[in-house]
Image (cartoon, grey):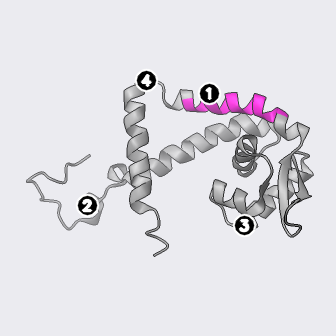
Amino acid sequence: MRDPGTEDDSDAGDPEQDLAMEDSVGFQIRDAHRLMQRYLQSQIEPHGLSLGMWYFLRALWFEDGLTQSELSRKVGTMEPTTLAAIKAMIASGLVERRRNRHDNRKLNVYLTRKGRALKEVLLPKAMGVNAHATRGISPEELRVLSGVLKKIAENVSGVADA
């Protein structure tokens, strides 16, 4: 990775040299994310889950009974995407919708017994994906990485919406 603070700017003006893919933080994050997603998919697919379902199940494992809007916010998806995932999970017998006791206009999404049972099987698989991806990285390096990624998210949060 070229140090932008060095004196040698002989490549200045060449777009390929200004931000080579391997020097792009965004590309590195995307590439690592894509590879981890592929690995995670290989672990959950034999259990009848898509990656889309995975994120919603994770949210419900930690807070069952969310509304569609709450699920969308927690997972970071648009409501039509959330609705499609909920319908697929209902068809797979993983969740059910029930009217909200306090507001009859709202539907809450609850895990079925089958959906709850997958937590014991799939969370260890996800933990294994993370362990595999971070092998050879010290706890201190992981702490720093987590802090850096959070800072990057803070830096770009809301910018695209402005």
Highlighted range, magenta: 117-130
Which of discs 2 and 1 lies nearer the camera? The answer is: 1
Q: Which residue is mark 3?
A: 79
User: Residue drawn 89% across and 47% down?
Assistant: 92
Upstream in the sequence, badge 2 or badge 1?
Answer: 2
Q: Is residue 24 left or right of residue 125?
A: left
In the rendered structure, find residue 128 and report the number of the disc placed on it: 1
Mark 3 packing: few (<14 Cα in 10 Å), some, or many (20+)?
some
| Prevailing SS of the magenta stretch | helix
Mark 1 packing: few (<14 Cα in 10 Å), some, or many (20+)?
some
**Type of residue at label 1?**
Gly
Upstream in the sequence, badge 2 or badge 4?
Answer: 2
From the viewer's side, name the closer residue of 53 and 18: 53
The kind of secondary structure element at disc 2 is: helix
Which of discs 2 and 4 lies nearer the camera? The answer is: 4
Can residue 119 be found in the magenta stretch?
A: yes
Residue 161 vertical placement versus 42 (above, below): below
Q: Are marks 2 and 4 in contact (CB under 8 Å)?
A: no
Q: Is residue 80 left or right of residue 145?
A: right
In the rendered structure, find residue 136 and report the number of the disc placed on it: 4
Can residue 72 be found in the magenta stretch?
A: no
**CA gap, disc 2 and disc 1:** 37 Å
**Type of residue at label 4?**
Gly
Q: Is residue 150 left or right of residue 16?
A: right
Quarter of the image that includes the C terminus: bottom left
**CA gap, disc 2 and disc 4:** 31 Å
Q: Which residue is mark 2?
A: 18
Residue 43 vertical placement versus 101 (above, below): above
Location of residue 144 in the rendering, given as x and y in whole percent from the top left corner: 37, 36
Location of residue 39 in the rendering, given as x and y in whole percent from the top left corner: 62, 37
